[in-house]
Image (cartoon, rainbow, N blue to C red):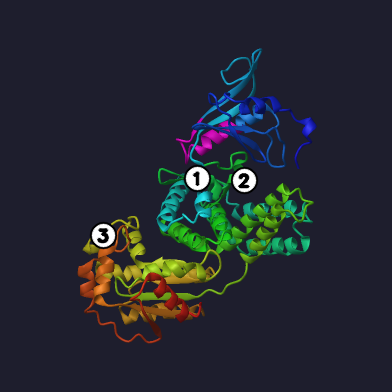
Amino acid sequence: MAEPADKLEDQAGSVAFLEAVGSLVPGARARRIDTHAARIFLAGDRAFKLKRAVRLGYLDFSTPARRKAALETELRLNRRTAPDLYLSVRPLCRSDAGVNLAGDGEVIDWLLEMRRFPDDALLERYADAGRITDSLIVKLANEIRAFHQNAAPSPDTCGHARIAAVIAGNAESVARYPVVLPQSESAPLVACQQDIAARKASLLDERARLGRVRHCHGDLHLANIAVIEGKPTLFDCLEFDEELATTDLLYDLSFLLMDLWSRGLRHEANALFNRYLDLAPEEEDGIGLLPLFMSVRATIRAHALAAQAGGQDGCSVLASRARAYLKLAQALLAPADPRLIAIGGLSGTGKSTTAHIIGHELGASPGARIIRSDVLRKRLAGVGPEAPLGKEAYTPQASERVYGELERLAGLGLDSGCAVIADAVFAREAERVSIGQLAARRKAPFSGIWLEAAASQLEQRVEARRGDASDADVAVVRSQADYAIGELAGWQRVDAGGTPATTASRVMAALRLS
């Protein structure tokens, strides 16, 4: 709980100076934004952060020395992802002439100076305006993956203990606001989260042992990402508690996935999840943890909003939002049986596009794991998804390895309780039979979808591709026309000659999802 105001120092003089006309920008008044732990003053091309003199259960900014240390840590940590935004920590002084930023007199507080970006650069604003594109999702996943690769690993192996502690902390926080967050709803939710975490304890600990628990961002949601000169930039990480920010990489990612999911941007969440996994092969074993991680993140958002609502007002907008997040946390844990869908067809039929469109409709949150043979081929060759490969990567032996890896990962996804879409040509009958048998061995429902379109359309589509994982060109399309496809026993033919949306709708109908 917060320390009583009369026991903490008064920052009114500092705030009055920072808000005064001309203090930060000649002739202008700064715009102030308040959070529970800081005040941000926007002036010209700069932003200045003043930590509030508060003492909460999880942070202590009660003295200038503590605030300085917190700001210096914030500067250091955020320079990991946004070195151009975070500039310096500056003293706020008081002399006989008054409060100043010139270094005159006694230091009374400290400010973090940052380069300001446009208000509409926040990814949260992009989401509100429907401007989060697939290409932006790719860039965002690339940035997060690169950051996670360089984050410092934790030396301990307590993966389960870490998430169990977060769940326990959530239980205490939620219990403080019974009017807003009824115990009849919160108690079963917490119990379910605890049960799932206990059942996943060995996996959580193994991931920690393998270095998947790292000093992450800790607060990775839409309002802490800005698109600057076309590049998603992560900023404002959790700086006040290194232990809280040290967590499973997928738990770090899950805050952003939950944020997108809660806004109805489920296609975007599924696309981000799949792109991240395409770049991070070592994370494939953890995908079954994401519903739990997203639920825990939604619970945090619920009690944070309940606290802002004051805890006693059950009718305010904030209270309603808090309850909505509590319900989301429950919904994210809804069981969904694993299933396997194979989407095959010659190059240009739209296999990957279709999988991308329908992925969020399948399985538990954040939707189906889409395993694409083109991406696996690049991964096995040790290059990025869009790096071109020569003909030596397309030998029968190389293709056999690709299909073997596709089946291995599909099996891992099914074993994790996920829905899986296997995206490959599947031109050989043996490949189609084998992927179906994989599902049968795991007693999972299987659907085989075969897309087909006119040869002229396939050539046009392949010619129009840019920056895609597929290396197929018109020559490949023409060579595939001679393939002996054989019987499509048990597979459903779907006309892919229309628009991507039309094809996706037909596939959804074939899968009985529409």
Which comes before the other along the chain, label 3 or label 1? 1
State the quadrant of the N terminus. Answer: top right
What SS does tag 3 mark? loop
Can you say whether 443 is above or below 403 in the image? below
What's under tag 2, amino acid-wise? Answer: Leu
What stretch of residues is rendered in magenta?
70-87
What's under tag 3, amino acid-wise? Answer: Leu
- Asked if the residues shown at circle 2 and circle 3 are in contact, with their CB atoms under 8 angstroms apart, the answer is no
What's under tag 1, amino acid-wise? Answer: Asp
Q: Nearer the viewer, mark 3 or mark 1?
A: 1
Give coordinates of residue 273: x percent, y percent. 48, 59
Observer-nearest of 457 and 333? 457
Disc on res. 120:
1
* Residue depicted at 79% across the width and 56% down the height: 179
Residue 406 can be seen in this image: no
Q: CA distance from mark 3 to mark 1?
A: 39 Å
Disc on res. 244:
2
Residue 89 can be seen in this image: yes
Q: Is residue 74 in the magenta section?
A: yes
